[in-house]
Image (spheres, rainbow, N blue to C red):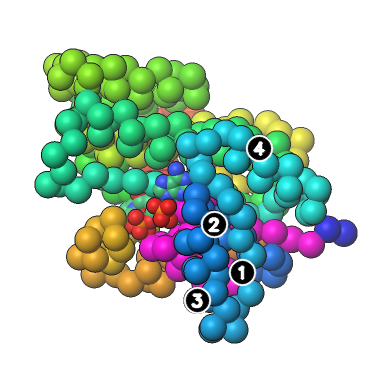
């Protein structure tokens, strides 16, 4: 049987690096540190090697579909599948950034939401039975959805919402932001938060779809790692990257047959919907 394999996106620094570090110690198989710069990945892998760990690395820019396809083909050939996928890569503009909001909305959603979705769409076909996926989201999504209009919020929380519908809503947010109309159209005034609403809702749908898949026991969760000291947070959070890695690592090491936490198909029941919202956003 092929060796087990885990992939972490955006892992040359920050929480992704912490996740690779922990998986190298806890995961029974090969762990791939991936990133968009070969040099930064090599440097990160070298650092981990100094601790006696043996991560492998592979090029992956989640904004570049060719690199995602190359990673999929490599995994298919060398491992005949994937057992763990951590969608960690992401970006956030600083509060003091002078980049216009229109640009921030476009770039943030392009990477955090559309990039992550492309990774999922490309790699999910080779997930093995019992695979575990975690999409790193943020409690910002919880805050942002409360700031959306009732109309927009109810569209995101439709029990039978589809990926196309989520894509449409996020695109609508981006388009509205280009003309400064996003708040008038009911969206929250946060590019990062809106991109993470997309990730969290996408996770619900992915598990619903996976529940109908012939492959057994594949679990997809989203989580917030907490407020973590990284470049993204300007090193302000209370958590170290090792502490930020705890929830994602817990979720990708869930044993076979786990029934919860698991982003389930939404039954339309209000209580269930709220419960799942809590499960998704730690
Ligand atoms: N830090 C927090 O408090 C916090 C809280 C909630 C959620 N999160 C989420 O946790 C995740 C990791 O954040 P972090 O704090 O560790 O941030 P970070 O230190 O800025 O690291 C982000 C990582 O993502 C990579 N990346 C960005 N764009 C990419 C792309 N197109 N393709 C591949 N990799 C890309 C970066 O690579 P480069 O080095 O090449 O730029 C870097 O490795 C993000 O999704 C973030 O939204 C963070």
In the image, 264 versus 223, the foreground residue is 223
Question: What is the span of residues highlighted in magenta in the rendered image?
Answer: 3-26
Would you identify the image quadrant in which residue 102 lies?
top left
Q: Position of residue 195 (x, y in %)?
A: 34, 35
Q: Please give the name of the residue rendered at 17% of the width and 31% of the height, measured from the top-left corner.
A: 100
Q: Is residue 51 left or right of residue 75?
A: left
Labels 2 and 1: the sequence-earlier one: 2
Q: Position of residue 111 (x, y in %)?
A: 41, 37
- Residue identifier under label 4: 69
Q: Please give the name of the residue rendered at 40% of the width and 39% of the height, measured from the top-left corner.
A: 112
Q: Is residue 6 magenta?
A: yes
Labels 4 and 2: the sequence-earlier one: 2
* Name of the residue lying farthest toward the front: 39
Instruction: Give the position of the N terminus as an image quadrant.
Output: bottom right
Q: Alpha-carbon distance for marks 3 and 1?
A: 10 Å
Mark 3, mark 2: which one is toward the viewer? 2
The answer to whether residue 243 is above or below residue 71 is below
Q: Position of residue 230 (x, y in %)?
A: 31, 63
- Residue identifier under label 3: 47
Labels 4 and 1: the sequence-earlier one: 1
Labels 4 and 3: the sequence-earlier one: 3
Q: Please give the name of the residue rendered at 35% of the width and 24% of the height, measured from the top-left corner.
A: 170
Q: Alpha-carbon distance for marks 2 and 1?
A: 14 Å
The answer to whether residue 211 is visible is no
Would you identify the image quadrant in which residue 83 lies?
bottom right
């Amino acid at each position: 049987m092929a060796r087990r394999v885990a992939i972490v996106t955006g892992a040359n620094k920050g929480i992704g690096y912490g996740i690779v570090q922990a998986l190298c110690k806890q995961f029974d198989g090969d762990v791939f540190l991936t990133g968009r710069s070969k040099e930064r990945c090599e440097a990160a892998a070298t650092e981990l090697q100094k601790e006696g760990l043996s991560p492998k690395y592979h090029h992956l820019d989640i904004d570049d579909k060719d690199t995602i396809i190359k990673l999929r083909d490599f995994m298919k050939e060398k491992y005949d599948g994937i057992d763990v996928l951590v969608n960690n890569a992401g970006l956030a503009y600083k509060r003091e950034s002078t980049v216009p909001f229109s640009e921030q909305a476009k770039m943030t959603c392009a990477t955090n939401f559309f990039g992550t979705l492309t990774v999922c769409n490309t790699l999910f076909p080779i997930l093995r039975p019992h695979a575990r996926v975690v999409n790193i989201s943020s409690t910002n999504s919880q805050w942002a959805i409360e700031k959306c209009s009732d109309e927009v919020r109810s569209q995101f929380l439709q029990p039978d919402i589809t990926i196309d519908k989520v894509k449409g809503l996020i695109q609508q947010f981006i388009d509205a932001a280009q003309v400064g109309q996003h708040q008038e159209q009911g969206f929250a005034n946060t590019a990062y938060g809106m991109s993470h609403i997309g990730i969290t809702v996408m996770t619900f749908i992915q598990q619903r779809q996976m529940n109908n898949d012939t492959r057994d026991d594949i679990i997809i969760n989203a989580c917030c790692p907490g407020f973590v000291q990284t470049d993204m947070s300007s090193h302000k959070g209370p958590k170290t990257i090792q502490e930020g890695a705890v929830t994602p690592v817990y979720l990708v090491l869930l044993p076979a047959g786990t029934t919860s936490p698991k982003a389930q198909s939404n039954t339309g029941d209000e209580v269930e919907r709220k419960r799942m919202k809590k499960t998704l956003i730690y």
